[in-house]
Amino acid sequence: MNYTIYLTDGCNLNCKYCYEKNMHKNNEIPFEYIKGIVDDEINSKSQFSILTFYGGEPLLKKKLIYETDKYINAQKHSTKFLYNMTTNGTLIDDEFVSFFDDNKFISLSLSIDGTEKSHNENRKTLGTKDTFEVVKENAKKLISKSDIVVAVPVVSKSSACRIYENLIELLDIGFKRINFQFDFTADWEDEDLEIIKREFSKVAEKYIEAMREEKEFHLLQIDEKIRSYIDDSMDCNDDCSVGMRGANLGTDGNIYPCMQFMYDERYKIGDYKTGIDKKRQIKVHNELKREMDECKECDLKKRCNHTCSCLNKAYTGSPTTTSPFTCEIERMMISVADEIGEKLYKEKSPVFIQKFYNMNYNSIERDILKKGGNPYGTKESK
């Protein structure tokens, strides 16, 4: 089992589009709770386990991260523990950079929206100070150590017209992996979708240019859709396991299937003392992982992330109801990906062929995805 651990529900920022504001309390997870799930993974003789440090802002509780690593290293076990984290990037210091460099991180997702304008209009401190410069410099420190750092820019209504501009800024900073998210607190309209489509047409041109120039460049949504076209057996919905391959440990010591269901007793599937209740786990999974009737006959359903209960609940309030916005964005991404794929395949682009047809390329990432982890970090914006 892979665990997302809520080290704290508190945060040092006041982002306009944050979906966790109602949870921003000063709750901190006791180390005893983390120790409980680590012991369970070891006693279960799991081959490997991914621990994702999350929040709130996890780096408010750096000591808990270091304590967890120290405890794992002190035990005799065969389980391979891998680390992941999502952070706003403001609290990264030299000690953490060294820790990141020395340890088994498979991914570190950093929330940065692109240009200074796009970032600062939404991501300020609790004291309303801008954060772009400090996040940018901290990002460079991490990128200098590893290229597994993922930029997670949130597209808001105000920044939708700057998607391409934000992409270029992130590439200039040094990111090679980018995972665009959309503000699901926004009231998206048809004209916004037209703007997004125009921007992603330019993004597609940049993607093709990078492949032609043999540069490493990963866009999560585009890469996923290209793979789903090439591999008929792939189902994009399998990435969302809703508590079956991964689960979330809250500051209350209870285990929940995913982030949109945190602290809701109806969706509790276990706790740090007794582990996961298998019957409860299956029941909750079956309740949340359902497809709408109107999606069942869609030709694109295997290539569309329409059964992600977290995103569905965020957009519509119902874990089993897909929003029209999600439908339109997924169709757009598929169209953009197919255009990219067809052009580069016809050109026999060496980097493209290597990336999507050589099964050994990014074999670690593929293995993690196959086992239920996500090397690109969370799919939800913070």
Image (cartoon, rainbow, N blue to C red):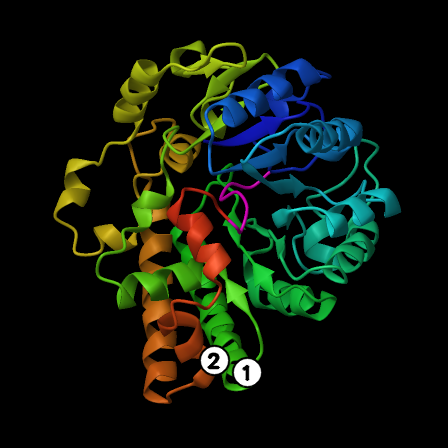
Judged left or right of residue 299, residue 189 is: right
> Which quarter of the rendering shows the N terminus?
top left
Q: Main secondary structure of the magenta part?
A: loop
User: In screen coordinates, is 125 left or right of 181?
Assistant: right
Q: Is residue 219 magenta?
A: no
* Name of the residue lying farthest toward the bottom: 347
Q: Is the Cβ of the residue at disc 2 closer than 8 Å to that at disc 1?
A: yes
Residue underneath mark 2: 351
> Residue drawn 43% across and 77% down?
354
Residue 178 visible at all: yes
Spatial CA distance of label 2 from label 1 is 6 Å
Give coordinates of residue 73: x percent, y percent: 69, 33
Residue at 41%, 42% in the rendered image: 372
11 with respect to 365 (left or right): right
Position of the C terminus, as image quadrant, is top right
Q: Is residue 12 visible?
A: no
Q: Quadrant of residue 125?
A: top right
Q: Along the line of sight, which residue is nearer the eye, 337 or 316? A: 337
- Note whether 353 is above or below 278 in the view shown: below
Residue 376 counted in the magenta span: yes
SS category of the residue bearing label 1: loop
Q: Which residues are magenta?
A: 375-382
Name the secondary structure under disc 2.
Answer: helix
Which residue is disc 1 drawn over?
214
Residue at the spot 41% in from the left edge and 16% down from the top edge: 269
- Give amino acid for label 1: Glu
